[in-house]
């Protein structure tokens, strides 16, 4: 017999219970990174220069259009005024890829925003979308700094 005490049943069971949690830790960390501002599903919050989005006629009065490639949503009021917002969710930085009427729906956690005002309609987001300058130049919609 050696001088070491025998391992108790409690020690063995405690180790077995902790092993699955330790094995999941890397996966959990990856999952959290995906919804954080530095994770892989994030997008730049706003264009850094003016971006030509499309023809002025693409956005009818009282409607909105999502320009996924530029992370911008543009709406036109009943009186014809254009408004533009970043379509990057203010909750976790995910690029919003769905527009239902004038409601933007974030794929990451279900936040919803009004595309005509940028306001939050459904949490978890609590901060409105970033408004962008927008103009119509030569029949084309241009949004972003300097627009």
Image: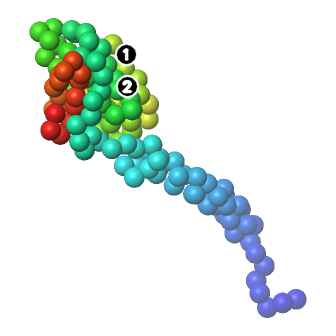
User: Going 27% across and 40% down the picture, which residue do you hit?
Assistant: 47
Q: Is residue 26 visible?
A: yes
**Quarter of the image containing the C terminus?**
top left
Task: Please say if 108 is above or below 36.
Answer: above
Which color scheme did the rendering employ for the protein?
A: rainbow
Residue 46 — which label? none
Q: Position of residue 108 (x, y in %)?
A: 44, 35
Q: Which residue extends farthest front?
A: 138
Residue 55 falls in image quadrant: top left
Q: Is residue 75 visible?
A: no
Q: Position of residue 7 (x, y in %)?
A: 76, 75
Would you call the spot at circle 1 few (<14 residues within 10 Å), some (14-19), or many (20 or more)? few
Would you call the spot at circle 2 few (<14 residues within 10 Å), some (14-19), or many (20 or more)? many
The number of discs equals 2
Q: Which residue is mark 1?
A: 100
Q: Which residue is mark 2?
A: 105
Q: Position of residue 42 (x, y in %)?
A: 40, 44
Task: Determine whether the residue tagged by mark 2 lies in a helix, strand or loop.
Answer: strand
Q: Position of residue 88 (x, y in %)?
A: 32, 36
User: Going 30% across and 27% down the picture, which residue do you hit?
Assistant: 53
Gap between marks 1 and 2 measured at Cα: 8 Å
Task: Determine whether the residue tagged by mark 1 lies in a helix, strand or loop.
Answer: strand
User: Going 27% across and 34% down the picture, which residue do you hit?
Assistant: 51
Residue nearer the viewer, 124 or 54: 54
Q: Which residue extends farthest right?
A: 1
| Mark 1 in CB contact with mark 2 (< 8 angstroms) | yes
Of the residues under marks 1 and 2, which one precedes in the sequence?
1
Q: Is residue 83 left or right of residue 59?
A: left
Q: Is residue 14 left or right of residue 92?
A: right
Residue 79 falls in image quadrant: top left
Residue 26 falls in image quadrant: bottom right
């Amino acid at each position: 017999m050696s001088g070491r005490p025998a391992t108790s049943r409690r020690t063995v069971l405690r180790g077995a219970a902790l092993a699955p949690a330790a094995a999941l830790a890397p996966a959990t960390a990856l999952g959290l990174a995906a919804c954080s501002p530095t994770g892989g599903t994030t997008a730049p919050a706003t264009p850094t220069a003016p971006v030509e989005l499309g023809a002025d006629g693409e956005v009818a009065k009282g409607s909105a259009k999502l320009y996924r490639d530029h992370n911008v949503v543009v709406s036109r009021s009943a009186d014809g005024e254009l408004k533009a917002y970043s379509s990057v969710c203010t909750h976790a930085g995910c690029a919003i890829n769905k527009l239902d009427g004038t409601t933007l729906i974030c794929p990451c956690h279900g936040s919803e925003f009004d595309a005509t005002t940028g306001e939050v309609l459904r949490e978890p987001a609590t901060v409105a979308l970033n408004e962008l300058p927008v103009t119509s130049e030569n029949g084309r919609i241009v949004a972003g700094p300097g627009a």
